[in-house]
Amino acid sequence: MSEYILSIDAGTTSSRAIIFDKKGKIIGVSQHEFTQFFPKLGWVEHDALEIWNTQLKAIKEVLQKTNIDSSQINALGITNQRETTLLWDRNTGIPVHKAIVWQDRRTTSICNSILKKGKGDLFYKKTGLILDSYFSGTKIKWILDQDPDLRKKAENGEIIFGTIDSWLIWNLTGREVHVTDVTNASRTLLFNIHSLKWDSELLEILDIPEKILPKIVSCSEKIAYTKQGLFEDKILISGIAGDQQAALFGQMCINPGDVKNTYGTGCFCIMNTGDKPVKSKNKMLTTIGYQINNKTHYALEGSVFVAGAAVQWLRDQLGIISSASEIESLAKTVKNNGGVTFIPALAGLAAPYWDPHA
């Protein structure tokens, strides 16, 4: 009897696996942090193989800890850090570059040159997104621009692109299934949120071959099975949503006007706008909330890039605390902020300013 749901939470700082029972009660959790790389000012990278290894370790560990057999898992769902961009070799499975994380600002100049050509409105009209280095499209372009041989391989379909959901599913299925869902696709700058397809005009502007892109699926459908032998039994993969959209749905914001706010690496406010994409007057993003049973629900989103990441920065870069939990007791040692406000624009400012240089 398949009694449990296995959930993968592929976050920006850690890989987590959670087992839920039919009533939504947490039966077990396993979590492993992975390395954050900061090669240059404003650059943030991850090792995709480390993400895969920590995620696989978390899954195996939570099954072992709870004494649950993989045959008892009814389905596997994935939620992931969005926009983080990875290109890998279709034949070897080896990434061609470290994953470029959503916080990374290296493609600001690419965005500026496209904006100077007056194409910003076109991207907004088709994707609902502000042209910013936050999103995957310019990251893909940057990687391909580094090496003409790489670009040639991409044009031949030997190199493929994915966000972290794609990468995990590709590995979980034994390198057989290359997919992403509509919510992750809607954060790439390449996906038309009205036609629900990859957009050839935008691909042409960014000089990205369509061959590298994953097949698009909905947030809830029978997608694939895990590779035979990876676990004791094959597990059905049947859910994907980018982390903020997953939180929107998970908090049951299923009616137009429902809003959720989540606090993690960054802070994200999303409002369900129903079956129609709504244009913001204050540079909020128009995005896809979720798609179930062929019905697409849209959302408006505002982002604060750095929230919990500021605590991590105080721990790992400034070294003023040795564990994240110390920050609260440290804050309580003073009555107030003494008139000083620190704005953690460590990766620029997002909505409503969209200032990458702040």
Image (cartoon, helix red, strand yellow):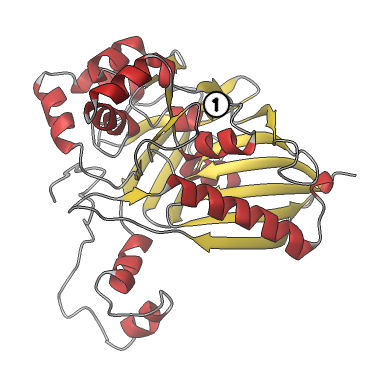
Q: Amino acid at mark 1?
A: His
Question: How far from the left and from the top, in percent, is residue 343?
Answer: 21, 62
Q: Quadrant of residue 134?
A: top left
Residue at the image position 13 percent from the left and 34 percent from the top: 109
Q: Is residue 32 left or right of residue 36?
A: right
Question: How far from the left and from the top, in percent, is residue 169?
Answer: 58, 35
Q: Is residue 264 left or right of residue 104?
A: right
Residue at the image position 18 percent from the left and 30 percent from the top: 111
Residue 184 in sight = yes
Question: How far from the left and from the top, in percent, is residue 25?
Answer: 73, 58
Residue at the image position 64 percent from the left and 33 percent from the top: 173
Front in this rendered view, residue 296 or 197: 197
Q: Secondary structure at mark 1?
A: loop
Front in this rendered view, residue 100 or 135: 100
Q: Residues within 10 Å of mark 1 (few under 14, many from 20)?
A: many
Q: Which residue is most to the right?
A: 1
